[in-house]
Image (cartoon, helix red, strand yellow):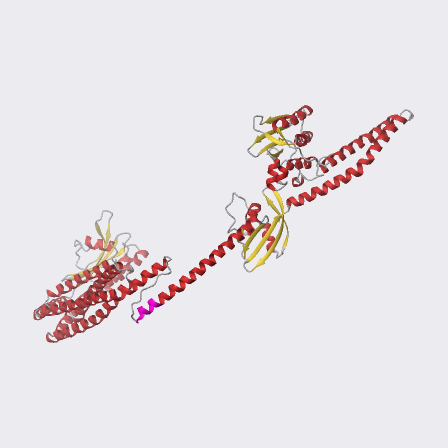
Amino acid sequence: MLEFAVAAVLAIMLVVSWLAVSSSEGRGQLLASRLTSSLLIGTLVPAMALMMLYGRRMAIRRAALSVAGTNGRLHVRLVWLFSLIAAIPTLLVVVFASLLFQSGVEFWFSDNSRGMLENANKLAQGYYEQNLRDVGNESVAMAGDLHDYLNQAAISSPEFAEGYSFQVVSRRLNESAIVEKGPDGTLRTAAIVDPDKNDNRERVSLDELRRLEAGESVVTHASAQRIEAVTPLDRARGIYLYAARNSDALALSQWERAQSVLKAYDILTRRARALQLRFNLALFTISLALVGLSVWVALRFADRQVAPLAELVSAARTVGSGNFAMRVPQHGAVDEIGLLNRAFNRMTEQIEGQTRALVGANAQLEMRRAFIEAVLESITAGIVSIDRNGAIRLINSSAQKLLHDRERPGPLGMTLGELAPQLAQLVASGQSGGVVLYAKDAEMLTLAVKIVADANGHVITFEDITRQLLDQRRAAWSDVARRIAHEIKNPLTPIQLATERLNRRYKRQITADPELFEELTSTIIRQVGDLRKMVDEFSSFARLPKPVFRNEDASDLVRQALFLQEIAHSEIAFSFSGENADVAVACDRHQFGQAMTNVLKNAVEAVESRARAEDVDFRGRIAVGLVGDRDSITVTVADNGVGLPADRDRILEPYMTTREKGTGLGLAIVNKIVEEHGGEMAFTTLPDGGTRVTMRFARDPLTRMAAVGDIAPAAAE
């Protein structure tokens, strides 16, 4: 692009030089010294630049074909340097020689005389042009004043005519007219001041109107009789002002005589033009030859200087590809290139030794990194490292399982506040540890957290102690249940026997109000039975026997439990789905049925509670579903009863109940049975206000519990 631009400039300068020479050739005068020097320099500079750019292209091509295959920057710099060294003195000599030659020519051909004639010609022409500018300026100023008059009075009013005439007289004009352009393009004279009464003369031509409509402020022209000017008065409405002043015939004649004298003088200088042009062409040719010679010398010199550097570049590329044993051959010269080669060989030798050390260190670091990652992944506790801004830098798999939702992208780069706000608050408080409640989906986890601060942020270690706390709580409740059963069950039998004996022995002897005696003894016996039932439930929860697993048909067990509830509660609509599913499971038949019975009884009680609270048209529904997959079976019990209580998170805790006579042990026993069968239990609120209970049982509980570490593999076998 630069070469094209310089070539274009050179072509333009050649055209300009030819036009300048051609324009003065007709008059036969010499070119001015400044003009000659300017044209010569203006043409010579782009020509030299084009030659230097061609040398640059040749330097790049020669560098690309060299061993190093570089972009030729050194070649280019040498070409520019040699070219400038040759071009700048050449230009100075050319300018000096051109000015010296031109001064001699001007001395012999009396340029001073030619200057006086030209000055006289310019003076006459300037006087003539001054008259044109004067009339034009007066017309523009007059148009501004008339525009103000039109804003105050109509064009046909006497006041406007008087002001118009005053403007013509005061501005020394001989004639003026206001011309309006009609919609059809015709011109109409709206007002005129003309002492000669020449109304039929065309004062404004169509060419002048086009120039004014194109944006010119005033159009002037002169003739032997007058100087005329046209300017817009109201451009939007097409109103224009014409003004004229009689011309000075003497000034015109003087200008014509000065031109004739100047033409006669040109004949005297016509012979010196050929010598002037030949001298400038010789300077131009010699200057280009000197620059071309410098470019050729620069290319040859660059080739000699770049050759050893090309070898060094090739060796550096070999080292860059990994061959640190590469060495540059020594040529024996004690110059800068030789010193550079020796320094390069020492550098590659040091790099080779350091590379071997780095490879060994990296291998050790990689082993340590793999060991640390294996340790972090094998730890069951969650570990999270954050920087000073709270962004997560490292997180192990245990922490991801506890904190991260798999549906979201990876936690690296997230802030701790986005992943676990509870942990972020504990870190912000400055504490070294604590216990944090963390909500994961619908489950509330209890985490034991330890925080260690370092120079780059914090390292957070936490462990899920939810199951540990739950086991401790169940163990405590089991201990309470055993104590209650032990303390209460012993006196129940004597109380019941004593009451029955009182009833049999003294029933006939009591004649006063025997019905009251019968009611009191019956109440004691009934309440003792209720206490015995409660103690039996305590004992069942405290000493639930270990399940005996046998292969059973879960569909048959579910239908049996459902049949008992259908017989006892015919007012409720029971339904069952999943009879054709593959639902073979290893379970304790008695405990599986006990779990189903307790869940169905809770569903029945929820439906009956809603039926009592609503009108008689309420129809209770209980739907039981059974599905199976490769590792487990799932039983769902959905009802349209009263729904879950407010404190649903504690619904599986022992002695947690919402019924008046409930012990709160039913769902606790069911949950314990489900867990011992390698499954889990969940509760969901339905849109109609009811509840769905989901119980998932492992198909092979012993293998599953052995896999998660609940029992030893040997026991599972």
The answer to which image quadrant residue 107 occupies is: bottom left
547 or 255: nearer the viewer:
547
- Residue 41: x and y, percent? 19, 68
Left or right: where does residue 480 sit relative to residue 63? right
- Residue 558: x and y, percent? 63, 28
- Residue 393 visible in image: no
- Residue 636: x and y, percent? 61, 32
Q: Quadrant of the N terminus?
A: bottom left
The answer to which image quadrant residue 522 occupies is: top right
- In the displayed structure, 305 sits above or below 157; it is below
Left or right: where does residue 639 sit relative to residue 250? right
205 or 168: nearer the viewer:
205
- Residue 272: x and y, percent? 9, 70
339 inside magenta stretch? yes
- In the displayed structure, 551 sits above or below 158; it is above
What residue range appears in magenta? 334-342
Tell me how many marks there are. Answer: 0
- Residue 196 visible in image: yes
717 or 195: nearer the viewer:
717
340 inside magenta stretch? yes
Left or right: where does residue 280 sit relative to residue 646? left
Q: Quadrant of the C terminus?
A: top right
- In the displayed structure, 113 sits above or below 44; it is below
Q: At x 29% / y 60%, what residue is drawn?
A: 68
401 or 355: nearer the viewer:
355
- Prevailing SS of the magenta stretch: helix
The answer to which image quadrant residue 582 occupies is: top right
